[in-house]
Image (cartoon, grey):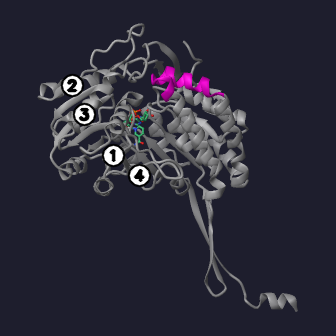
Amino acid sequence: MVFEEVKNFINGEFKSGSSSKIHTVISPLDGTELSTFNESTMEDLNEIISFAQKAQKAWQKITLKERVQVFYKYKQLLEQNSSELTEIIYRENGKIHGEAKAEIDKAIELTEFACSLPQFVNGENMEVSKGVYCSSTKLPLGIVASIVPFNFPSMVPHWTIVNAIALGNAFILKPSEAVPISSQYIAKLLKEAGLPDGLFNIINGTQATVENLCDHPAIKAITFVGSTKVAKIVYQRASQNLKQVLALGGAKNHIILLPDAHPDMASSNIVASMTGCAGQRCMAAATLIAVGNCDAILDKLINDATKIQCGTTLGAVITKAAKERIESYITEAEQQGAKIILDGRNTIVPGKENGFYVGPTIVDYATAAMRVAKEEIFGPVLTIVRVDTIDEALAIENRNPYGNACSVFTQSGGLANYVTENASAGMCGVNIGVPVPREPFGFGGWNESKFGSGDITGKSAIGFFTKEKKTTTKWNPEAGTNWMS
Ligand code: NAD
């Protein structure tokens, strides 16, 4: 075993889960065993809750400005430990080092935003009628939990950990069972930064653990990030139990390519978007809709994609099953008459023969009705559908049940506006392949890519992780005169 046994983090201490069910963590890079963990029980969760309740009561008594001080120190620790944290992500997730390092950089940026919360969180106070004042303040919810996916072992947990705790809540993280090791280091560093015990907790497990989180009455709010299938389950179950829920699901992002796009800019952005993190990003370019004659740009794009090499500029996919699923989409498209211009099936990286690799793949002349063009593949596969008009392209994009991201590539401002105004997606891009909004803007899609209101990061997080108290005050207008006399 390369890493220590993965444990729950309860009241500042690591402790094995109580279930006898053991889960093994496999490295996608070469199929080796990295670690194991015992799954958790409701008793483990109850233990976390009892400490978290006490810790949260004390934490909410200090001011926001005092609370964020711990995150200045934590940010420094992330910077100092960046190389080690990067290596862990590389080993457990299989993405290349540059992408793993980018996750830590993003975790640092998210922590900076949490440090700036005292500048953003403000109540209101106004005289609503003569001598009557209404004021509002934002208070923590209590205990909140986040359930996270495999594709960003550090960044996605940081979407919520730092804001939720800074805003006065105690926090429970349920890491993805595929990549639970990064979270162990997050716990160590938060403790080292001085975060009081009981405020950050980890519970390891799979479906049963998620169900326990959805059912536990002491948990006031849940965020979920993962597939749409599970997002719906979590949204329904936790809402049924009267919790506040925000559940982010899967995606099938569309790129609308117009013939006047800048060839280099379009090609480099689209190739990076389809192959980055081996296509295992909810913001990855998945279906490219070429409007009119885009052949010159597409030739360049195909040529650029050919240069992407598994093991150096393209990481592994998470499991053998994921590799097989991705390859089956390509095979099916081929059987249905699409052309496989670049074929990443059966890729073997020398020295890593047991790793899970799929090379960059371009499926051309697909129809919008094919599964390869419609469904989330979550691999380095770009499907090209060719149409004659922008409205046909938008109709395809609008018909898709997801609604995370949509980007247009063009040098015309008017056409860019037309696409972004009419795309049915929460995050739109113009000449950008991965249009992730940066803080203080919030991250969140539409349609089947998100259930619940608001976004998960940025200023939206303030609304999600707090409740507002409104106080109406009226004083006797004569009181001052009486007191004076
Ligand atoms: P997943 O849905 O399989 O798992 C996510 C979490 O849910 C994990 O912690 C897992 O243990 C838990 N889980 C799995 N099955 C469950 C069940 N039946 N009941 C309860 N809990 C269950 O997702 P994944 O494979 O880890 O991640 C990939 C997916 O996440 C893709 O669909 C991707 O688009 C999506 N994603 C979305 C966003 C976004 O912001 N919208 C961001 C990252 C990833």
Could you tell me if residue 456 is visible in this image?
yes
**Amino acid bearing label 4:** Gln
Instruction: Specify the segment rendered in magenta.
Output: 81-99
Vertically, is 444 above or below 434? below
Vertically, is 32 above or below 379? above
Secondary structure of the residue carrying numbered label 3: helix
Residue at 49 percent across and 47 percent down: it is: 222
Q: Please tell me which of labels 4 and 1 falls first in the chain.
A: 4
Kindly report the distance in space between the C-alpha atoms of the residues bearing marks 2 and 1: 22 Å
Q: Please tell me which of labels 2 and 1 falls first in the chain.
A: 2
| Residue indicated by mark 3 | 298
Residue at 28 percent across and 57 percent down: it is: 418
| Residue indicated by mark 4 | 240
| Residue indicated by mark 1 | 407
* Eye-nearest disc, 4 or 3: 3
Q: Is mark 1 within 8 Å of ligand 1?
A: no
Kindly report the distance in space between the C-alpha atoms of the residues bearing marks 1 and 3: 16 Å
Vertically, is 139 above or below 131? above
Mostly what secondary structure, the magenta segment? helix
**Amino acid bearing label 1:** Ser
